[in-house]
Image: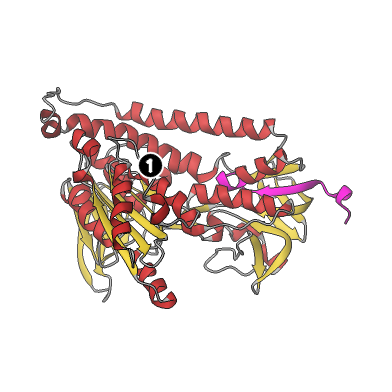
Amino acid sequence: MSEANFDFDLIVIGAGYGGFDAAKHAADHGLNVGIIESREMGGTCVNRGCVPSKALLAASGRVRELADAEHLSRFGIHSAPVRFERQKIADHANDLVSTIRTNLTKTLERSGVKILRGIGRLEGPQQVGLRESSGVDKTLTAKDVIIATGSDPFVPPGIKTDGRTVFTSDEAVNLEWLPRWIAIIGSGYIGLEFADIYTALGCEVSMIEALDRVMPTFDPDLTKLATRHLIDGRDIDARAGLLASKITPGCPVRIELSEMKSREFVEEIEVDAVLVATGRVPRSDELNLNSMGVKTTRGFIPIDERMRVLINEKPIPHLWAVGDVTGKLMLAHTAAAQGTIAVENILGNSSEIDYRSIPAATFTHPEISSVGFTESDAKELASKDQFELGIVRSYFKANSKALAELDSDGMMKLLFRKDNGEVLGAHIYGLHAADLIQEVANAVHRRQSVIELVNEVHTHPTLSEVVEVAYKQAMKQLNGR
């Protein structure tokens, strides 16, 4: 088929951040672009994830701060009992979602992207099926197709949800009610953030983690410090090594707990509500991937570093995938970067992604962030490439700005090579950790050495000096220095 006979130069299936960035970037470079979306524009992040949850965290964080009489008294401040309106907090999140969704839609329209409402699927090479909400089904053609259908919350077997007493983060962001006692299944970033919200607003929380320690995906050293503040210091009963083998909605909700390793029944508990925060699964079932011979792994679409979809590790011409559906780093900014990179390759500009330099953050109070290698992965790399791994820790308790804020409970761990000083990664827990990690992420992206970084001047007094101190400590450990 000649290019002139295609309906579009590019069709993007899915209008989350990955699809949005791909469609806009392509349109800005002169391509005729169509984007298909069956639900709300903006995908999970805008409607059910990053955006509303951060609005809730911002509001509940203010409540927590004002209610911390002991902390305020150290400043000489005495506040009245804190009152809040749940509905107005929920409205703040909903209004923010509406604003960002509208802005995103208008941005695409101004760029010349045609928005196609309905369910998209593959129908063969350079062909996309579209089932509109009216039921009309049609086939469109495009020179290139990008799949950006995202993910949904994972609900394990044995757990029934009703959207009211047992629910996922999709429903939790609506903050329709505040249960007196809520169980959160999972202690990853979603579980931690909602535990932060619920405890600030007066709820009791039980946190159930199937793996052998709470916060299993976080750096162990940071976990020890963060657990004292984010879990032990709050009205949270955290239990690890337990499987929520059966959850039955109702009033009350009944949870059957079993030993994770043996699967032996331990006890049944009753709570007012349950938030299931056990990860996410890709939305790939409706894509008709068989029409192209694509085989997924647990639903994730295989891609290479240029975002090309693979069959038997070989790229399929003109078919690309980005975002959560690929199962790489399931973060909105990863999806956005992947979308832009896919389009760059469509335009003929060879471009690859550097996952190592993509930071991640958990927006608790205080925050947690990371970039690059974990300590265990860095040790494996050091053994494989035969270099000595360096590890230094920089503490917020020595930082003037943190002390001025009376919020010095924090630490940064920096991983680096002792032979050449290259920064391999960092993990931060503390005030504004989500902002601080970007400086290290930039260094990882450039493969910079602390030899260069140690001479960069940081503003005093700021939290960024925590990073500066880490670089200076690392410099002292370099071999031959």
The N terminus lies in quadrant: bottom right
Q: Secondary structure at mark 1?
A: helix
Q: Residue at x 20, y 42 (%)?
A: 408
Residue 177, position in %: x, y? Answer: 31, 36
Q: Nearer the viewer, residue 399 or 17?
A: 399
**Which residue is denoted by mark 1 in the rendering?**
435
Q: Quadrant of residue 29?
A: top right
Residue 162 visible in the shown view: no
Residue 101, position in %: x, y? Answer: 54, 34
Magenta residue span:
1-19
For the image, the number of numbered tags is 1
Q: Relative to residue 11, is residue 417 drawn left or right?
A: left
Q: Nearer the viewer, residue 259 or 30?
A: 30
Asked whether residue 92 is drawn in magenta, I would say no
Query: Mark 1 belongs to which amino acid?
Result: Asp
Neighbor class of circle 1 (other Cα within 10 Å; few <14, some 14-19, many 20+) is some
